[in-house]
Amino acid sequence: MKKLINEPKTVVNELCKGMIEANPNLLAYDEENVVISRKVKKRNKVFLISGGGSGHEPAHAGYVGPGMLDAAVCGDVFASPSVMQVYNAIKENHSDKGVLLIIKNYSGDVMNFENAADLAIEEEEVKVDSVIVNDDVAIEKKEDRRGVAGTLFVHKIAGAAAEDGASLEDCKRVAGKVIRNVRSMGVALKACTVPARGKPTFDLEADKIEMGVGIHGEAGIRRDKWVSVDEMAKVMTDKILKDLPFKSEDECALMINGFGGTPLQELYILNNEVKQILNREKIRVYKTFVGNYMTSIDMAGASISLLNLDSELKKLLSSYSNTVAWKEF
């Protein structure tokens, strides 16, 4: 295993410090591996906190800043942050208007974030509420679906509502609307390598792909023969459209998300194929995002996310934000 690291156990702490060194006017650093925003720390607004295991960079710390998150809690690689990490993030980043936790639907994240919320309500008398993102259509049962790249749309739109002065209840409402209207599907061409493990998380033959992968190095729901990108795009997009029916002339936001080991060249080719499918279905694309938004360390592959938009979501999606990984002006 060749990686630009010192020791596996120091990866998360050092990546947080490196991000802060590169962005001193935007981010502050806390020894609990909580990345916070200096620009909004003292404002009377609903505070948004998210996070989870590291290894998904730029998520989640890359989305801390005006118009998105106020704090991101960084657990070990592919491991939930502890209850105390999340509790301390709430304790240090809240206002009288309250805190909204944006949680991806993984058992460790849900348990630790919700326990931290209960503790903050009891010990600090902070108003805390939460939403759970489950946009991964690879899983058939909706209650078991994982939170993947669609989570970024929740950060962006709920963050815009908070920036506009919305109440905690209204921030939760609009976050819930995004969750109901976003779906994602991913494919892997090569597994990722977790620093502490030192080898790929699963073996994948040269002529095979993993369809329906998550973002924690887990294998997909099935292993298929390698096909051209137009066929991959059709399988993934069809799965999304069947789960979240669009009507002709509906508008959407489209995210082509790289998993960390895929060249932009290939992501743009995938975007072209998905756009052609949507054109045939007469679904209009209001905004397109192509790049590494929620990765799986160095996995080769990509995911497609579609968000069905109404006028409220369109306005909030286009609102001002200024973070390391997402800027809207």
Image (spheres, rainbow, N blue to C red):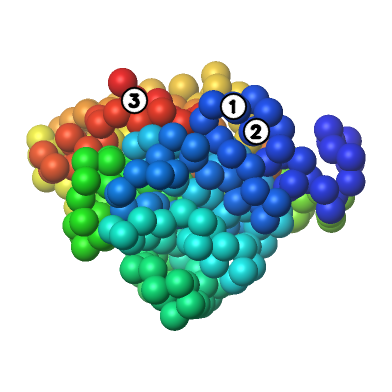
Quarter-of-image position of residue 189: top right
Question: Alpha-carbon neighbours of circle 3 within 10 Å: few (<14), some, or many (≥20)?
Answer: few
Q: Where is residue 186 in the image (x, y as percent from the top left)?
A: 50, 47
Q: Which of marks 3 and 1 is nearer the N terminus?
A: 1
Q: In this view, does 229 lie above or below 160?
A: above
Identify residue for label 2.
19
Marks 3/1 in contact by CB < 8 Å: the verdict is no
Q: Position of residue 167 (x, y in %)?
A: 21, 56
Identify residue for label 1.
23
Give the residue type that dot 2 points to. Answer: Met
Quarter-of-image position of residue 292: top right
Q: In which quarter of the image is the N terminus?
A: top right
Q: Which of marks 3 and 2 is nearer the N terminus?
A: 2
Identify residue for label 3.
328
Q: Which of labels 3 and 1 is toward the front?
A: 1
User: At x 52% / y 30%, what residue is drawn?
Assistant: 26
Kindly report the distance in space between the C-alpha atoms of the residues bearing marks 3 and 2.
20 Å
- Mark carried by residue 315: none
User: At x 57% / y 54%, what residue is drawn?
Assistant: 73
Give the residue type that dot 3 points to. Answer: Glu
Q: Nearer the viewer, residue 295 or 71?
A: 71
Q: Residue 67, can we see it?
A: yes
